[in-house]
């Protein structure tokens, strides 16, 4: 019998695993014993670098897909099933961020964010759920949202709206997929030291201003999101579904979002 927090024997897919939060999640799932497919779009270098960080790189594989395209998502899942014959954990992490004032937001930017964050997550969750149901095995779908789902920020309107939609999606999917023993949960990170924030956080004065607003006194690290994802993917979280876990150092207990 494996320990409740062990993922030994499990297969996981993490989209956007080539850097930041996605890499942090992939590393922690692998550390817990899962075989991990690192999803990516564009160049494979980042995803390959993530797999190279595993204690056993043979427990990883890279799989390409533009998650906005259903056929590519289905091909990604099919490749995992072809090689490992199962999919137990789907982490919908890949996302798109664009920021501009409402009146200046371009249609192309609006559509890219919505198509990636909402439609892409839908495609990934649907393909994963079908694979889990076909094999009659319990599963986990973990959706990465954001604290901006709760407290909109001026500028990234489409981003905040899309992340709020993911909270609703997780609740709806949790209800519909429960009979198949598939749990669906959101994680909403706050300010994390990841690609989208590097430019701001590398400025010492800007970083100090941001950290002053966070009760924990610091920004989060990708591995801290990974630890929560590993817990939710494990048997220890078998009775958790349809909810959201905020990982933000207490940011939402304070004033305006950053």
Image (spheres, grey):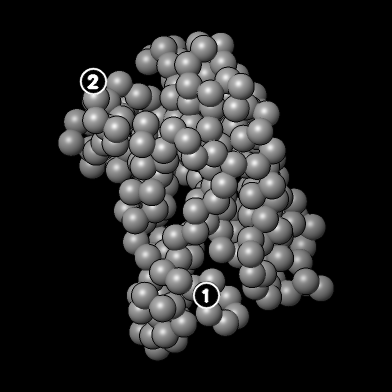
Front in this rendered view, residue 47 or 247 = 247
| Residue 31 found in image quarter | top left
Residue 156, placed above or below residue 210? above
In the rendered structure, the answer to whether residue 200 lies left or right of residue 35 reads right
In the rendered structure, the answer to whether residue 252 lies left or right of residue 35 reads right
Residue 21, placed above or below residue 35? below
Residue 162, placed above or below residue 176? below
**Residue farthest along the front direction in this orientation:** 239
For the point 34% across and 61% down, which residue is it? 221
- Res. 112 visible in picture: no
Q: Position of residue 242 (x, y in %)?
A: 59, 41
For the point 62% across and 27% down, which residue is it? 177
Distance from Cα at disc 1 to Cα at disc 2 = 40 Å
**Residue farthest along the left direction in this orientation:** 55
For the point 42% across and 85% down, which residue is it? 212
Secondary structure under badge 1?
A: helix
Residue 91, placed above or below residue 251? above
| Pointer 1 residue | 253
Dot 2 alpha-carbon crowd within 10 angstroms: few under 14, some 14 to 19, many 20 or more: few
| Residue 204 found in image quarter | bottom left
Secondary structure under badge 2?
A: loop
Quadrant containing the C terminus in the rendered view? bottom right
Dot 1 alpha-carbon crowd within 10 angstroms: few under 14, some 14 to 19, many 20 or more: few
In the rendered structure, the answer to whether residue 3 lies left or right of residue 241 reads left
Q: Position of residue 161 (x, y in %)?
A: 71, 58
For the point 77% across and 63% down, which residue is it? 106
Front in this rendered view, residue 211 or 116 = 211
The label shown at residue 169 is none
| Pointer 2 residue | 1
Q: Position of residue 120 (x, y in %)?
A: 64, 39
Quadrant containing the N terminus in the rendered view? top left
């Amino acid at each position: 019998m494996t320990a409740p927090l062990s993922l030994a024997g499990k297969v996981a897919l993490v989209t956007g695993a080539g850097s930041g939060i996605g890499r942090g999640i992939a590393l922690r799932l692998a550390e817990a014993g899962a075989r991990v497919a690192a999803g990516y779009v564009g160049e494979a270098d980042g995803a390959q670098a993530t797999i190279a960080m595993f204690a056993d790189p043979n427990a990883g594989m890279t799989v390409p897909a533009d998650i906005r395209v259903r056929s590519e998502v289905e091909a990604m899942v099919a490749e995992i099933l072809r090689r490992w014959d199962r999919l137990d954990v789907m982490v919908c992490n890949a996302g798109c961020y664009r920021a501009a004032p409402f009146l200046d937001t371009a249609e192309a930017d609006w559509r890219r964010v919505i198509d990636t964050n909402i439609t892409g997550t839908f495609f990934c969750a649907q393909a994963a759920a079908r694979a889990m149901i076909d094999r009659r095995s319990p599963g986990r779908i973990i959706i990465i949202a954001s604290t901006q789902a709760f407290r909109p920020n001026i500028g990234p309107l489409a981003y905040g709206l899309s992340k709020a939609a993911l909270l609703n999606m997780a609740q709806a999917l949790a209800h519909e997929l429960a009979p198949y023993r598939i749990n669906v949960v959101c994680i909403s990170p706050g300010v994390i030291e990841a690609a989208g924030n590097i430019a701001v956080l590398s400025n010492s004065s800007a970083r100090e201003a941001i950290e002053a607003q966070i009760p924990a006194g610091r920004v989060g690290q990708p591995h801290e999101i990974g630890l929560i994802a590993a817990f939710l993917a494990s048997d220890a979280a078998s009775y958790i579904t349809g909810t959201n876990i905020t990982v933000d150092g207490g940011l939402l207990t304070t004033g305006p979002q950053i």
